[in-house]
Image (tube, grey):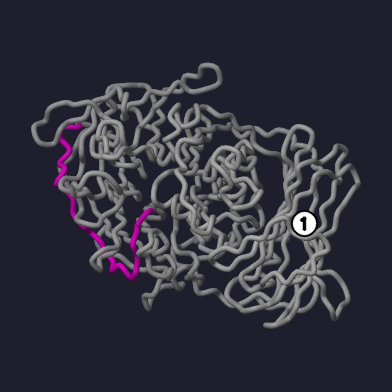
Amino acid sequence: MKKMRSTGTGSLLLTAMIMALLVLTAAIPVSGLYHWEQVSEEGFGDLSNDYAWSMAVYTPPGESTEYLYVGTLNSQYSEPQNLISDGCEVWRTDGTIVEGKYVWEQVVGPNGTQLMIQPINGSLIPASAGFGNGIPGIQGMVVYDGLLWAGGLSRISGIEIPTTGTIWVTNGTHWRRANIPGFGDGVASIRGMAVFNDELYVGTLKFKGGVGASIYKYTGDSIGRDLNAVNASAWTEVFSVAANDAWWFGVLKVFNGYLYAFSGYGGLTTDSSSAQGCEIYRTSDGTSWEEVVGDAPGASMPRGFGDNCNDFILCAAVFQDKLYAGTKNSEDMAEIWRTSDGLNWEPVEQYGFGRRNRYIWRMIVYNDMLIAGTFNTLSGCEAWMSETGDPGTFEQININGMDGSMTLIPIIGNMSTSGVPRADQYGVRSVAIYQGYLVAGTATWADLFLDKLYYYYYTEGEWHNLSGYVGCEIWRTDGTTYDILPKNLDVTKTVWDPEAQAWVQELDAVVNDTVRFRCEIRNIGSSNLTDIVVWNELSRNLEYADRATIDPARINVSSKGRTRLEWDISYLSPDENIAIEYDTNVTNYVSKDLNFLFARGWSKDHWDTDWDMVIVNPTAIPECT
């Protein structure tokens, strides 16, 4: 983690907060990365399994074997759709290791070993891919009343059959549909699932017809671990909000006698409205709900924790008597917030750990430590650990992308219209504790609409069949560490302060000012660095104004107005360095003004990376569009 150098001129409160948190983060000594091992084949042997989207530990009735279940997002779709082979899969393992990998059984899929019960006549048929309904993915899993329940994403392509978010339930041998006929038109998915006061609650994604997210409770008679006792029509809506409040209750969490529902708003599809920020609701009895973060008069904080760019809360964890929540932030600076009483929230991490981490996608407590996994499409998913959960105490415990693989340029073409390759595994998408190990399932580029849209955004209008080149992976660690690889690459980014006549890391500026940056790249190790790529991310407040001492190899301006400058450096020997200076113009004030420098180079037998950042005239909280 990067140490910050001294700053220049006076700053606003936001600047002080940013710098203080980053300095704290940088000052924590890194004891070492966790030793991770990959315990699945890529995509479980099928590269169309793009996300290890959900995960649960479950012991079926009458058995003593504890299984780890994984539900996938599978992007393989035929035209016309094949309801036998297209759609999600469910895999499980009993923990047996052969040649370094778990032995996996496909229980739902084209070669699924299990059966499912037809809802009409009760006959048994193979549990084919997508449960024979073309369901793309399983987004959530929970164990309730001795059975394993799984929430699905509704079909997004294929034959014209009315679809809704579905729930499926299994006793470890057979599967059946658990919500018939469903929760109404427009319910796109079931992801948030939790057991509260011995009752099962689920949250929906719905944004059509003016009706937003809802929460349903299972109201059937006692199941007693009997799959046949599940009443698929016994669901009661206990809470709902308007579409302009929240589209999604994707996370439900129990804390101190309350069930908390974490919302999301905007930013999912092309028909989305401008982001307004996430909200948090809670209940003590499952019936009466109060808004603790949002627009309600009694809410302790405004929606989005005061930042509209926090448009989704994607994970939550209870750690050391505090409730933690991780956000998706549309400015690529995901945040973590926490509370002791459910009402008063404080920031833990507000800047994506200083990287382009757009999501805090998963959190879990393991070995008395809080673990957070991120989404990062450029340099790969990251996992961070803290022994206290306090600001500035998180250390990265994995190599980006789990193994540093960045092969998407030679495999599928230039995804960023630049020479910077993208990571194979961009998200820590599911987590569990299994047989004493922390297990993480990853996500990679899919052929579904959302990833196509994301790819379209980064390539300024190109489409590509993304699936089938890389697949999801399952990794595990027991928390042991190994020595950090020797560091060779070091970068520093500064900005020229004309009053102090010095290079600093913080500067106040006004519109129409010309601001000059300096990027230094050094080899501080004992081995050569080769194939070095340097990329410089400017905020939306700045535009490149040339006068570079070394011309960029590539210049990319995104649809959101961010400029990325890239340089290629073929070789740096030990103690050698290069400095690059260039000008920018201050054009407006529309975002938090963090300006990043990244570099990566090959050092003997591994990729070495480093980063730095400066602040130029930080602004008020941005209005996301």
Q: Position of residue 166 (x, y in %)?
A: 25, 45
> In this rendering, would 38 be left or right of 216?
right
Q: Position of residue 598 (x, y in %)?
A: 71, 54
Q: Residue at x 62, y 79 (%)?
A: 588
Tell me the amino acid under the disc marked 1.
Lys
Q: Give the residues drawn in magenta, as a range.
A: 227-250
Within 10 Å of disc 1 (Cα), the crowding (few <14, some 14-19, many 20+) is some
Pointer 1 residue: 3
Q: Residue at x 71, y 73 (%)?
A: 616
Residue occupying the far left of the picture: 121
Residue occupying the far right of the picture: 575
* Relative to 320, residue 296 above or below: below
Q: How many marks?
A: 1
Q: Residue at x 30, y 31 (%)?
A: 85
> In this rendering, would 447 be left or right of 597?
left
> In this rendering, would 383 be left or right of 435?
right
Pick whichever, 554 or 72, lies toward us.
554
**Is residue 44 in view?**
yes
Quadrant hosting residue 66: top left
Residue 392 in the magenta stretch? The answer is no
**Is residue 611 in view?**
no
Pick whichever, 487 or 539, lies toward us.
539
Q: Position of residue 466 (x, y in %)?
A: 47, 43
Quadrant hosting residue 397: top right
* Relative to 377, residue 222 above or below: above
Residue occupying the far top of the picture: 98
Q: Secondary structure at mark 1?
A: loop
Q: Position of residue 374 (x, y in %)?
A: 54, 49
Residue 240 in the magenta stretch? The answer is yes
